[in-house]
Amino acid sequence: KAWLNVQLIEDKERREAYASLLGQVSVECKPTLVLQTALKELQQGIQALLGIAASVKEGSASRAEEENAGGLRIRLCPEANTQGERSQREDGFELQYMQAANGNEAIYLIGGSDKGIMYGVFHLLRMVASGKRAAELNTKESPANELRMINQWDNADGTIERGYAGRSIFYGNGRIASDLGRIRDYARLLASIGLNAISINNVNVHELETRFITEEQLPEVARLADLFRAYGIALFLSVNFAAPLQLGERNTADPLDAGVQSWWKDTAARIYSHIPDFGGFVVKADSEHRPGPFTYGRDHADGANMLAEALADYSGLVIWRCFVYDCMQDWRDRKTDRARAAYDHFKPLDGRFRSNVLLQIKNGPMDFQVREPVSPLIGALKETNQMVEFQITQEYTGQQRHLCYLVPQWKQVLDFDSYAQGEGSQVKRIADGSLYGTAHSGIAAVSNIGDEESWTGHILAQANFYGYGRLVWNPELTAEQIALEWAAATFGYNPTVTTVIIGMLMKSWAIYEAYTAPLGVGWMVAPNHHYGPDVDGYEYSRWGTYHFADRDGIGVDRTQASGTGYTSQYSEPNASLYENAATCPDELLLFFHHVPYTHILQSGKTVIQHIYDTHFGGADEAERLREQWAELEGQIDEASFVHVAERLAEQAEHAKHWRDVINTYFFRKSGIPDADGRVIY
Ligand code: GCW
């Protein structure tokens, strides 16, 4: 049940006060599919929280009744969709507490649409569970972002690319699951935090998933779309750009070929005949050996627009990923810089994409490292719909065996000022579409769930999923607030427990960073599976991910003055800030500069001493996490306690391994001893 693990309110007085208020629900709007979901959730929630069965009455009250009637009254806001503010307003809701002259208490839940009502129901239940009194419930909410999306990297064979929580809940043995129970639970979790879109298969589309858009498979996909529809979630598919060729129906996948264009049009018609509200396509093209328009001498705009044209009549969207770079680089080549790639590929195409295309840009220029600068492409596209891509699954951040609460990292990205239109051009204003007034925008993230009981492999990693949804709904929430909401909803409203958990979550990103790759340089992980330290694992490889450590220094020179020129992709003053080693923030120094180990950081320490200190400190802190958790024994359920304790023990040991590998490597390279004389091997 994760954060929907609603418990009976223990305080009898509060429970009774709420029972008289929520025991009677009157619904004054059309019973749509999503509204039915909302009412079901409401009734279940009330049952669990208050131990009563709420009576639901449909139809509007007469004026006389109206004035004195109490209870929960649900209705639609008549103006919501006439105000022209895109779908965010429709997804919004208002809660109003009122006391009638006769003393009756009422709460009005007014939704911008049936979806707004559903989000309002989840919000109301969360507030009641958290101990709020009825009079404190007044609120008006609407999501900041239009598209609030989850990307599954699930494969039809049941595996999950970069999945760390078991196998897929969607597929097994090449088929879509016949038992949809777990998927329905997942849809509830998504809806409860306001998410409204999901792509259900890996962006690396293999042979089996290429067939999802065929007549044979579409009825199966439609079953999933039906399920998600009831929770207000639009279903998207990742598609294989070469599908017409691979399915043997055309002899090319050239986007400018008339036969290919008509193939995709027919395909779109077929998809929409099964799924009338199909969301659209997610596309990884010309990236890591996936097919794309380059084969035919065409560019990304040609490719994306061809698909967009096919979907346009149905208001479908094409979400085209910008994760495009040369993964066959020669490590001897010092000019090619992977960090530059997304910008170099897509910036020149700005303005050429159809209005139903969105470019999806990873938060950093490389690949979801523990620390990266914000991608300079975000904001640089001024006439193109864009969305930001985060990774909830912890590929490079401990694979759900280490604790790493990512909400603070995402917040830092969303709050980053790109200066693309001068001061005040924060990433969150690009994601929400307000900076450029784009037709579509939003945020997507790669899911971290699988079929394990805990959903996420590490119970505390559920906080990342929850936090992602809440943050995308409202980027102004703080990481602490989100952590508190999550911990309380999951483990109950016990301040001793929540305080410890929030403390652990809030420190965890910094701790993980401390004992892994230093000062923004990234990688240093074992190739392929990416778990554990291997400093030179990618140093002489084709992936373009280098640190260039030698006996004198370390880091990648990405300056305009003497390096790859990457800093020029940023707007001023960011470009100069990063260009100059003296002003470049310490945590990104080695991303932008190659410096001697004796270089003095803004912190006053040398680079080498910083490496030693953070690695000793980080491993100690990981040990502290384990001790803090141990304090909770007996205060949370035994199974969860043990589950987390085991993982924290592994993390503490593994952090020591990281510490010793990294420290030893740099001691051997530099010959410079630790100022504090600690053990280095
Ligand atoms: O992070 C990298 C992963 C790949 C992934 C790729 C992508 C789905 O290592 O496994 O492929 O990014 O984002 O396309």
Image (cartoon, rainbow, N blue to C red):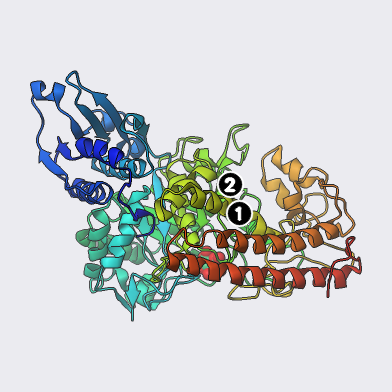
**Callout 1 secondary element:** loop
Say which element carries label 2. Answer: helix
- Height in image: 57 above or below 278? above
Residue to which mark 1 is pinned = 364
Instruction: State the image quarter where residue 55 is shown.
Output: top left
Q: Amino acid at mark 1?
A: Gly
Picture disc at residue 413: 2
Depth check: give the residue in front, 111 or 457: 457
- Residue 66 placed where, x, y %? 13, 24
Q: Residue at x 27, y 35 (%)?
A: 112
Task: Please say whether residue 281 is visible from this viewpoint.
Answer: yes
Quadrant in the picture for the C terminus: bottom right
Residue at 32%, 29% (x, y): give it.
135
Amino acid type, label 2: Val
Apparent side of residue 612 relative to residue 149 in the rendered image (left or right)? right
**Callouts 2 and 1 close, C-beta under 8 Å:** yes
Circle 2 residues within 10 Å: few <14, some 14–19, many ≥20: many
Q: Position of residue 502 (x, y in %)?
A: 54, 50
Instruction: Decide which of tag 2 and tag 1 comes sooner along the chain.
Output: 1
Query: Which one is closest to the eye, mark 2 or mark 1?
Result: 2
